Structure formats: C-alpha cells, structure tokens
Image (cartoon, rainbow, N blue to C red):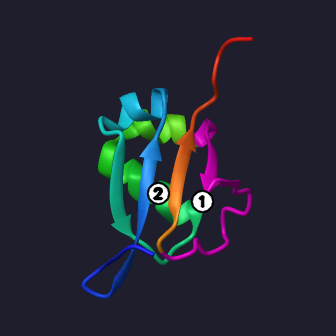
Amino acid sequence: MTSTAGKTTLVVRYFAAARAAAGVAEETLPGGGSLDELTGELAVRHGSRLAGVLSMASFLVDGVAWHDRQAPLPGGATVDVLPPFAGG
C-alpha cells in the first residue's frame, strides 16, 4: 500500500494516447475516491485533451478491469488508463 504522511495514495499509469495527453507516464495522487472522482481530477490537472481520452478509456485497478465508476478505489491501488487501441 502506498501512503504519504499517513494518507493513502493511488498510482495512475498512462498508456499510448493517454500518456501523450497527460504528458507523463505515471503520477501519484491522493486516494479515497471513486473512478469518476479520479477521472474528474485528472481532467482538471491535465486539460481537455486528456478528458477526451478518459471518456473513451478502459481502466484496470491492480490489474483487474474496473467497471463500477462509483465504487471507491482501494487504497494504494495502481490505476492503469488504457485508451482504445487501433490495429488488428
């Protein structure tokens, strides 16, 4: 579990277009909210380009697909942001 001065944090990892839009590969943020709250915070931090990617992205939480955007994220989790991939 990741914590800073007793506060739980999340590690957010960006892939492909999400990485390009965020301008970073990874960042650590305060934990304690839902996926909707997290994506809202990420959009504020990084702007409309990332917000657009987030609206189409899939998310893994500790390697498991996360579909309930209102459920609290577990403390110390790693959240992977996976934009739609092209190809075949």
Please report the residue visible at 70 percent of the width from the left and 55 percent of the height from the top: 64
The residue labelled by disc 1 is 62
| Residue appearing at x 64%, y 53% in the figure | 63
Instruction: In the rendered structure, find residue 49 and report the number of the disc placed on it.
Output: none
Q: CA distance from mark 2 to mark 1?
A: 20 Å
Residue 49 is one of the magenta-drawn residues? no
Residue 57 screen position, x and y as percent: 61, 39
Highlighted range, magenta: 55-75
Q: Nearer the viewer, residue 44 or 24?
A: 24
The image position of residue 61, as x and y in percent, is 61, 58
Which one is in front, 83 or 70?
A: 83
Tag 2: residue type?
Answer: Gly
Residue at the spot x=63%, y=37% of the render?
A: 56
Which one is nearer the viewer's eye here, 24 or 69? 24
Q: Nearer the viewer, residue 50 or 15?
A: 15
Image quadrant occupied by the C terminus: top right
Q: Residue 40: which disc?
A: 2
Quick check: 28 left or right of 57?
A: left
